[in-house]
Image (cartoon, grey):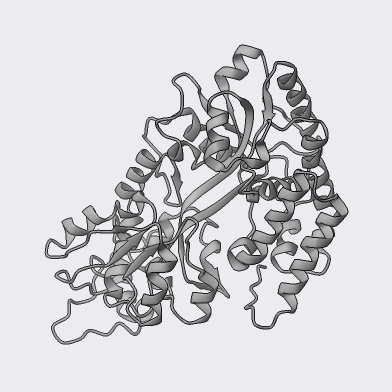
């Protein structure tokens, strides 16, 4: 919602930025500099993905005297936890990958700044609008801990099932509209000598994602809400049982590509792109992760996980998650610079560059508008548009990462034939109950 400049300027000095009083010689609070950034001070930014550094050019253009060269790190935990412990953390951090930070622990220890001041600040592009007004609705929830915005999850990740549109066209195959359709398609692929379905066996979270999406499409959003809230028996819900049994049919019917359980994400994706398998569940980071390996004419395209039957609670349901959390440490030396860096990151130009170069959608409105989109990115965007308000979400994997890993591992064992469905349910429910009963673990709740 737009705000008149005069009203905004008055608010900035008060409720918006309370506690940021002007020090002697410091810049004045203004729509152009809401955090009173010292334009000559260096900004320490550590990122785990290249696109996390794209805002540096915009920052340097505005603050010509600043030194800002984002550091790309693959060892985030090892490098940054000692810095948090000694009170010398960076000014801004992008935390993704296998070494991503334990956000719940950092929140509990008071290490992360409240980012509401960023959301309420004037946007980089339009001082008459707030930053939060430029963002997609409901994409901020992932970064809220007990109602306080501690991270800004920047990428709007769309989950679904990938296929080659050109392969489907050559064989006369149609995108399945229900799960039985998908199983029938798998049988056709198998008859054609193709491994129908492949997944990253060493990263079984992708399978758990598939189960939860199916369960929510069948039973509605309360299914995953009860799981997030650690409600008694949430994993015993009939919709969850139906979903895991449906996914298990891929194993029972021999529709998994040979060796699927042994592949990591790169291995499974290479097999898929080599047309050794017909379908692959994954998020829409796939195109960027495999750039240079996608064959010409492959027409990489995503379809939504089809519902179990023709009368689901969420017919257009789609799992969309805000991922790639950026954070500003509370004890950062140049905290204002960290906040300003995130404000630049949320500008239209930077967000468009991220979408263009990483082939991913961001939480900034219209970040893909006007771009020449690939089949992969356009299909993800179209699925989001078709989903409307039937977006499926869950947060337990961020709140309780150890539990999420245990649930994923159990799902991998189930798909490999090592667990029966009843054992899968009992093991995950017991793990959830253990989290609930452990007073040392901070609990979170969604309404």
The image quadrant that residue 28 belongs to is bottom left
Of residue 154 and residue 314, the one placed in the foreground of this image is 154
Answer left or right for 245 relative to 120: right
Of residue 17 and residue 371, the one placed in the foreground of this image is 371
The image quadrant that residue 310 belongs to is top right
How many marks the image carries: the answer is 0
Q: Quadrant of the C terminus?
A: bottom right
Of residue 371 and residue 11, the one placed in the foreground of this image is 371
Q: x, y (%) of residue 79?
A: 37, 68
Answer above or below: position of 142 versus 87.
Answer: above
Residue displayed at 41% across by 44% down: 366
Answer left or right for 20 relative to 57: right
Residue displayed at 23% across by 59% down: 69
Answer above or below: position of 414 versus 37.
Answer: above
Q: x, y (%) of residue 122?
A: 32, 64
Of residue 365 and residue 56, the one placed in the foreground of this image is 56
Answer above or below: position of 293 versus 334.
Answer: above
Q: Quadrant of the N terminus?
A: bottom left
Q: Is residue 79 visible?
A: yes
Q: Is residue 128 visible?
A: no
Q: x, y (%) of residue 260?
A: 66, 37
Answer left or right for 109 relative to 391: left
Residue displayed at 32% across by 71% down: 90
Answer above or below: position of 65 versus 345.
Answer: below
């Amino acid at each position: 919602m737009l705000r008149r400049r005069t009203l905004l300027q008055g608010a900035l000095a008060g409720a918006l930025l309370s506690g940021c009083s002007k020090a002697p010689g410091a810049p004045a609070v203004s729509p152009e500099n809401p955090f009173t950034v010292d334009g000559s001070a260096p900004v320490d930014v550590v990122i785990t993905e290249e696109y996390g550094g794209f805002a540096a050019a915009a920052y340097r253009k505005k603050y010509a005297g600043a030194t800002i060269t984002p550091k790309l790190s693959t060892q985030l935990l090892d490098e940054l936890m000692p810095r948090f412990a000694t009170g010398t953390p960076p000014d801004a951090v992008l935390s993704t990958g296998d070494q991503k930070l334990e956000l719940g622990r950092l929140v509990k220890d008071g290490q992360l700044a409240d980012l509401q001041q960023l959301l309420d600040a004037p946007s980089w592009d339009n001082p008459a609008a707030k930053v939060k007004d430029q963002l997609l609705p409901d994409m901020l929830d992932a970064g809220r801990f007990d109602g306080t915005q501690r991270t800004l999850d920047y990428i709007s990740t769309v989950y679904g099932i990938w296929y080659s549109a050109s392969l489907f066209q050559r064989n006369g195959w149609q995108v399945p509209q229900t799960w039985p359709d998908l199983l029938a398609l798998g049988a056709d692929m198998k008859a054609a000598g193709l491994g129908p379905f492949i997944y990253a066996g060493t990263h079984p979270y992708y399978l758990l994602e598939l189960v939860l999406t199916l369960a929510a499409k069948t039973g509605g959003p309360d299914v995953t809400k009860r799981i997030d809230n650690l409600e008694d028996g949430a994993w015993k819900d009939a919709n969850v049982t139906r979903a895991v049994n449906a996914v298990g049919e891929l194993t029972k019917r021999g529709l998994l590509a040979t060796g699927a359980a042994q592949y990591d994400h790169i291995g499974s994706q290479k097999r898929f792109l080599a047309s050794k398998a017909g379908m692959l569940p994954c998020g829409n980071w796939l195109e960027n992760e495999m750039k240079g390996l996608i064959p010409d004419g492959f027409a990489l395209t995503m379809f939504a996980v089809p519902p179990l039957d023709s009368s689901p609670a969420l017919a257009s349901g789609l799992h969309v998650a805000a991922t790639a959390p950026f954070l500003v440490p509370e004890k950062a030396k140049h905290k204002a610079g960290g906040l300003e860096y995130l404000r630049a990151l949320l500008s239209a130009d930077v967000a468009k560059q991220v979408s263009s170069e990483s082939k991913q959608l961001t939480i900034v409105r219209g970040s893909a508008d006007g771009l020449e989109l690939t089949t992969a990115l356009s299909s993800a965007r179209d699925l989001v548009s078709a989903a409307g308000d039937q977006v499926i979400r869950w947060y337990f994997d961020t709140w309780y990462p150890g539990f999420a890993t245990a649930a994923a591992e159990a799902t991998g064992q189930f798909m490999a034939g090592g667990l029966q469905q009843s054992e899968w349910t009992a093991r995950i429910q017991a793990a959830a109950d253990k989290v609930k009963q452990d007073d040392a673990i901070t609990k979170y709740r969604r309404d």
